[in-house]
Amino acid sequence: MDSILQDLRYAVRGLMRSPGFTLAVIATLALGIGANTTMFGVVDTLLLRPPPGVRDASQVRRLYFRFGGTTITIGGGGGATSPSTAFPAYEALRSVHAFSEVAGFTDGQVSAGRGADARPLHVRAVTASYFPLLGTQPALGRFFDSTEDRLDGPPVAVVSHNYWMRQMGGAPDVLQRTLAIGPFVYSIVGVAPDGFTGSELDEPDLWLPVRQAAPVLGSAEALSSWNWIWIQAIARLAPGATPAGATAEAQVVYDRAQAEAGGGFSTGPSAAPPRPQTTVLLGPIQAARGPELSSDAKVALWVSLVALAVLLVACANVGNLLLARGLRRRTELAVRAGLGAGRSALVRQLLVESVVLALAGGVAALLVALWGGAAVRAYLLPSLGSGATLLEPRVLVFTALIALATGVLAGIAPAWHASRTDVASALRSSARDLGAARGRLRSVLLATQVALTLVLLVGAGLFVRSLRHAQTLDYGLDLEHLLLAGVQQRGANISMSRQGPAPSPEGPVDAQSAQYLRMRERIAANPAVASADAMAGTPYQSAMMVSIRVSGRDTLPRVAGGGPFLMIVTPTYFSTVGTRILQGRGFAGGDVKGATPVAIVGQSFAHFAWPDRDPIGQCVYIGVGPSSTCIQVVGVASDVRNLSVTRPTTMTWYLAYEQHLMDMPLDGLVIRSRGPAHLVEGQVQHALQVSEPDLPYVRVQTLTERIAPQWRSWRLGATMLTAFGLLALVIASLGLYGVTAYGVAQRTQEIGVRIALGASRRDVVGLAVAQALRATGIGALVGVLLALALGRAVSSLLFGIRPADPASVLGAIVVLLAVAALAAYVPARRAAAVDPMEALRYE
């Protein structure tokens, strides 16, 4: 121990005598370690750390439902596995004996206030069992109970700690206050603990009892119908229960409940198509883990590997710097060896120096993570609760461990080589005599930096091109000029998935539709607006399916994109959204109630329904009964992607709202702006909000904003890999500069001789640059092989391009070679300016 402390004091004194070298190493390691600390904090939050305030989180399970067919979820999601189910299914699952408690919840926005004062609030509606299941206690007041969580229960609410502080200034009389949401007035009965987000990562403004809030959130029908897919469920395992046993029992209970409900769906012309077999699954409380990792979690894990590659680049760079420092200290080490220091003592001393540098780099890395963590939180985890921090104690432990490992990794090879000192030869040799002996190791470390940097640059290129491909797809809609607007009816509009029509949540159909028609007329007169239309079935928000049959076919084939999905629109919808009519005509002013019922079908619908005949004049029938009315196809529109970016083909068809063929209310506006939509978004929102004094909050988004969440994984990958790739490129270029500068210094006499014998300065520069490019070329070759191998592993995260994308690979090589040439040129040019006589006398 005394010898280690002595080595520690000696290392600190020696490093303080070389401030330039010390700061360069600490800065390099701070970037590498800081990147890993930041990404570990992200992965820890997404996959490892339970939400704050949850007791014994390992016993809490999230329920998932895997459908045999495709499900459609409002918001553009969907797929074979969903965390949502019908409320009757949730109530049935409460009887599972392997669960000690089951709770349900759903998220959305409500509208508080009216007219110009309307504002959105994020609400989480939960069952009374939610808070006891998670094992948390309120900061003030109480949580609601089962006597309040019912349809006729009193309107009560729990506010989040953040909302209490932000909107109410931490008022001590908060429990005597009320909140007006639409026509309802909620009494505040409690304040949630600071930082508590429940089972999710994001913190809502309000918590409401889900049963009494059902009419506000959508419809009281949602509490009894299997057609509404909207509630999520969590459960706590009973003592002694296993996840496998609980899953099996939950499956039996679910199947029995669905069978007793007649297959889970009502019958008749407006019924939804029968749902295939549903499998109940259990997952951890961390939603990103699910039965399958979320796209954000996958990207975070890959970016973590990228951060590790950046650290390896930094280690290789520091290793080269330590090698150069070891060569400069060869006389000092030889003297110590001559005085009796053994090789193990020399290695220990050099390793102590390396570890001291790494630990100092780790401390600096915490500063990098504090700054970088805030940026990453805003980008990778935008929904993270306000009280959360990426620098938890376990993250600090991780930083200390990785700093220690980095010190050993970066220092072991230089320490081993520096300790191989022959006393006599070291005392009489020059720098150039021993430099060649270390040249191979420096070249290996340099090639390692180049190879890893190239892998990161190729990865960045793949994600950038995936994002670009997604953004330039033919959506069948004009992304640049379209705005979507929707009123949060009755104080709230929770995103629910449903299959089949149902009564309007706002009473008679005409009441809600009339409001949208008035808004349409008023906003169409705005100078910034070219046209506006109302619709039922908003792109990238809602989808409607009804049972239909078509003339000449018994059944419609299933397609990967799903459908057929129905949209009900006003007459000029197609010109407003930019969807082309390929055959026949669009809707006209004469398509009103009492006229011949007409429909327009999408191109894929027409192809699959009538592959061998003209679709114009064919019939679409709603329902399967013989009394169904023929709705005549009068036009074929181009296909649109109105649910998912990645779905290849979606069957869509359209009805004219004015014909009132379906008892469906209008639920949104689509607005075409005269200029770019994002420039007039605020103006349009304000104009709509003040158009009626009693109007709830109107949400206005550009269509690009509505689609953007589906681009998220590619945007994250492109941004993070580009950032880390550029960071690795900077570190590698510094390494190239240092190795070239050191190599030139070692060959100063040789350069002087060459110049004295007639070599031009361009020849000298070319010689030094070519040597650096040879090492870069070898590293680039290895990097290409690694990039091609790793590209297959990330192929599922890419979109529209192959992992071996030539443009990404060639672009990365060109960038790397250009930076390498520039990094080598500066010291080479300095060497070419040397005076031959001075060079010949150089030691």
Image: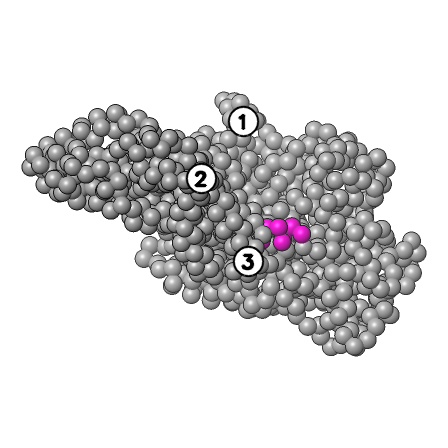
* Figure quadrant of residue 633: bottom right
Name the residue beneath numbered marker 3: 806
Up the image or down, 84 lies above or below 346; here it is below
The amino acid pointed to by label 3 is: Pro
* Residue 437 visible in image: yes
Q: Kindly report the distance in space between the C-alpha atoms of the residues bearing marks 3 and 2.
A: 38 Å
Does 468 lie within the magenta span?
yes
Name the residue beneath numbered marker 2: 760
**Most common secondary structure along the magenta stretch:** helix
Q: Nearer the viewer, residue 593 or 378?
A: 378
Give the magenta-colored segment's residue range.
466-472
| Badge 1 element | helix
Q: How many marks?
A: 3
* Figure quadrant of residue 33: top left
Nearest to N terminus: mark 3 or mark 1: 1
Name the residue beneath numbered marker 1: 166
